[in-house]
Image (cartoon, rainbow, N blue to C red):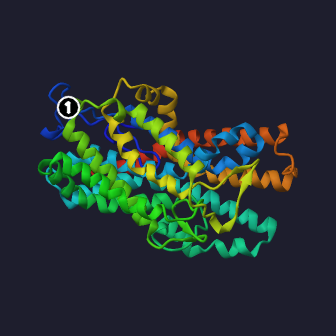
Amino acid sequence: MDSTETTDVLPAITPGHRPPEAPAKPAAAETRESGPLPSFIPQLTGVRALAALWVLAFHFRPELVSSFPFLGRLAPLFDAGHLGVDLFFVLSGFIMTYTHLDRMTEPWTPRKALGFLWLRLSRIWPVMFLVLLGWALYRAYSLQANADASIQAAASPARFLEHVLLIQGWFIEPDQWNPVDWSLSAEWLAYLVFSVAIAVLAKMLQTVRLRSLILCALVSVFPVVAIGVTMEDGSDLLLFHNALVPGMIPLRVLTEFFGGAFTALIVMRCGRAARLPWFLRPTVVFVVIVAVIFLVQHFDPFRRYNMGLDWRINGHLMWGSAETVIVVPLFLLLIGSLAISTREPMAWLLRTKLLIWGGKISFALYLVHWLCIDVMRHVIQTKLHITDMPTSWEYRLIVLGFLALTVLIAHVLHRFFEEPTRRAMRRMLPESMRA
């Protein structure tokens, strides 16, 4: 990553180093004791790694719980792994606001907004398109090998074009190509809105009281929580009776993205001099999030299984309770508290080299992992015929091997494709639009 481009996208969202010539943050971001807020917050890069691993565990959970029965104890946490996407949405809104507020609003111009959108596109589009081509080849192979008419019907060229244009998540249609890149489409929608709304956010930083900013952050995520608790268990906050809920994707991303944006305003207003009570510190908040997820899954008073199926493996329910969405407001608190904490155990853990590296490859990991899972299941079911022996070492080695392969592919994509193409697209912009 070069030093003048500071952020990634869902799920690769990285605060980076502000260029030497960039203007200083507004006076509201200054603190009485600690000076200006840092331009790079490494622990937020580590959050990306945790969120990506959470999504990975969510999609790999049938094989993990089948082949390693002791992991069944973590099934409630795995089942809520779709919330890793919500954590990314919140983190994205925070980082976009924290990084771009001053450089885009002194003053705001359409030219700055277009430059911002091009730089965002350089982050998400090249890897997305490459993985989409991988899915196209895989679909073609599956169609030839299986002669399955349903695959041909699903592989719609028009739908492929929607994926290319990053608008596939704006419509009420199932995912026919890469099942996980709907979130990039949602993120792109958030960027389009943010490129204009940032002028309002800058005004709010200067004029709105701190308590009102806190209220705005909480109110912004209320709709997705209120609607989410009414959905079916295992619906992943998208489906009801196995059909996409109209408007759920835009609602989900915009509420959480701007919840993160308001959290950034709060942090910029308070600065690093803020003194958090023990129960608001990131380590405590993280433990509370995990505890709430387990408790909600265990004591869920409304069992509403997706498609009416009581799906269990080794006696462990595989549907995540819709009510776990109540932890979304805690994501705001986790991100905000991490941004101003450096000596907390959780902040220290997230700043380790391993998690920083995991955060850097998280975008590629997110995009490619479902393709790896699909190939793994194809190998297990059609080539090795060992689906009835999930606890055999052969089965276990295949699962672990594909997990490792997924991480390796993500690393290669990040280092040899994601970063070079981002820099190439960045160079296409006039120098004045790159900051």
Residue marked by disc 1: 36
Vertical relation: 188 (above or below) 398: below
Between 396 and 193, the residue placed more toward the observer is 396
Q: Give the position of the N terminus as an image quadrant.
A: top left
* Residue at 62% across, 42% down: 409
**Residue 249 percent location from the top left of the image:** 45, 65
Residue density around tag 1, few if under 14, some if 14–19, many if 20 or more, within 10 Å: some
Between 292 and 34, the residue placed more toward the observer is 292
Q: How many numbered discs?
A: 1
**Residue 122 percent location from the top left of the image:** 41, 52
**Residue 222 percent location from the top left of the image:** 36, 59
Q: Say whether residue 426 is visible.
A: yes
Q: Quadrant of residue 252?
A: bottom left
Vertical relation: 344 (above or below) 163: above
Asked whether, in this view, residue 159 is left or right of residue 155, the answer is left
**Residue 39 percent location from the top left of the image:** 28, 35
Asked whether, in this view, residue 308 is left or right of residue 416, the answer is right
* Amino acid type assigned to the residue bearing label 1 in the image: Pro
Vertical relation: 363 (above or below) 166: above
Q: Quadrant of residue 344?
A: top left
* Residue at 47% across, 54% down: 325
Q: Secondary structure at mark 1?
A: loop
Q: Give the position of the C terminus as an image quadrant.
A: top left
Q: Quadrant of residue 337?
A: top left
* Residue at 46% across, 43% down: 420
